[in-house]
Image: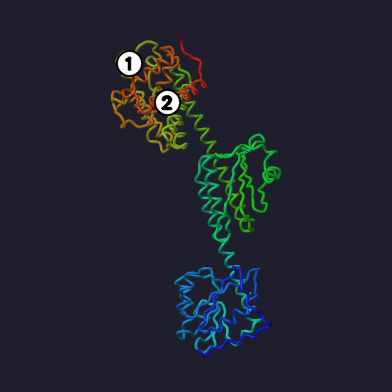
Amino acid sequence: MDDQILIIDDDDLPLLDNQQAGWKVMIVDDEPEVHRITKITLSKFEFDNKPIEFLHAYSAAQAKELLAQTPDVALLLLDVVMEVDHAGLDVVKFVREDLQNKMVRIVLRTGQPGQAPEDDVVTNYDINDYKDKTELTSQKLRTLLRASLRSYRDIRTLESNRQGLEKVIEASKGIFEKRSLRQFVEGAQEQLDALINQEESQIYDVKQFTYEVRDQILEPLLPGHPSVRLVDAPLILRQAMANRATVYDGNQMVLYCRNPRHHLLFHIETTRHLSQMDTGLLSLFTENIIVALENIRLNEVIADNQREIIYRIGELVETRSKESGLHVKRVALYTELFCLLLGMSEEQSELIKRASPLHDIGKVGIPDAILHKPGKLTPEEWEIMKTHAQLGQDMLSGSDLALFQIGATIAGNHHEKWNGSGYPRGLKGDSIPLEGRVVALADVFDALGSDRCYKKAWPLDKVLALIEEEKGQHFDPQLVDLMLANLDKFLKIRDQHKDIYVGDH
């Protein structure tokens, strides 16, 4: 081709042999001389203290292949006429439509303006500048690069901020879904790591520690780290505590989060200095962490109130039976221990624990003469007494609350027996809901070892002998084995919540 580019060198600029990575500028032209002169002219050019990294394509086909492999090209210096008269315009269409790359700046350079009239090209194609090769002096070329790279940099910054905000929103959604404090901390640390490891802001080897402040002691909330006295803590942690605020210092930060119940410090160390964008996004995310932490607190308050109400209801039922109110608390703690030993999640174990005090709620429908009878019940009275299981299930059924749904299951099934001889439905083996099997053993274990209006507490060896005897008959064999293998944990609960018999002997 005859296209010639006229570049008047202001200085005699030598080539740099060892250029460091910088702004990627792709020269697309079928004239090797254009590549050589452009590279010489811009060899010492820098923008934002970063040099130019040149990429070269000598045809539209080669340019398309290279652009598809290199999505972070900042500037495309593109000839119009190459293999065909519209080759350069085909590249523009490929970049904008096929690759959907809206960020790369495209400058058309042509030595034959008549082949691609400026008005038509600018109107119909998404380009950023149009230059006749004869007008590009060395100074004008450098001016063109500065303007183009500044535009590209600002677009990338906006895009990084947009991606960062999306990450903040996504991360916030993740932590808002957490209900327990431990889940919240695990989720927050995971989202913090994802947030600060962005494409434009890589921070490798991030170390995270989360502490809860208790009486000037920093207690780690996740395993693997020791407690730290505040006076012995790293300076940045003490600064955050003194200022009651988030602190950024070079390559580390402490996110300060506090509400009336929880006082948390997220200490994060990285391998390089945090950028302004990093700290801005982290500050925004910290505000959401504080809101999410307040949600955790409110959930805990609701759970505490709910637990207290359920215990009171259970104690009311037990008191009516002239039995100790602490029975329901012990059964609840035994139930939780069983659930954890079975490998259930903390959340599910807590829910079943909170529902277990409702196991005998059906007794409110049993006449006092039967409920308080000190001697043995007649067959007719026993049939009436047995109805309390179905009564309890009926009272709690139909609720939309998971707590009462589980409570209904427990109330209706905690008198079923493994061999099918229980009541009210005579269910057998695994057909008995697990919650009912667990509470059945917990209830009997505690009832036998406690004073009641109709009996004295049995000694432990007698209680264990009966449970062994009823293994596979009354009780789920797996649960019996779990209890005997972890008997010290069950006895610890019993000893910590001893009661005084309030009935008549």
Regarding mark 2 in the picture, which secondary structure is present there? Answer: helix
Q: Position of residue 67 (x, y in %)?
A: 49, 72
**Residue mark closest to the camera, 1 vs 2:** 2
- Packing grade of label 1 (10 A; few <14, some 14-19, many >=20) is some
Q: Position of residue 347 (x, y in %)?
A: 47, 37
Left or right of 261 in this view: 465: left
- Find the residue positioned furthest to the front: 17
- For residue 31, above or below residue 227: below
- Packing grade of label 2 (10 A; few <14, some 14-19, many >=20) is few
The amino acid beneath tag 2 is Ala
Left or right of 241 in this view: 412: left
Regarding mark 1 in the picture, which secondary structure is present there? Answer: helix
For the residues labelled 1 and 2, say whether their Cβ atoms are less than 8 Å apart.
no
- For residue 7, above or below residue 171: below
Which residue sits at x=49%, y=46%? 177
Cα–Cα gap, marks 1 and 2? 38 Å
- For residue 122, above or below residue 377: below
Identify the image quadrant of the C terminus: top left
Q: Which residue is mark 2?
A: 485
Please tell me which residue lies in front, 321 or 10. 10
Q: Position of residue 335 (x, y in %)?
A: 43, 28
Q: Position of residue 300 (x, y in %)?
A: 53, 37
Task: Report the disc number at residue 381.
Answer: 1
Task: Report the disc number at residue 433.
Answer: none
The amino acid beneath tag 1 is Glu
Which residue sits at x=55%, y=47%? 189
- For residue 245, above or below residue 323: below
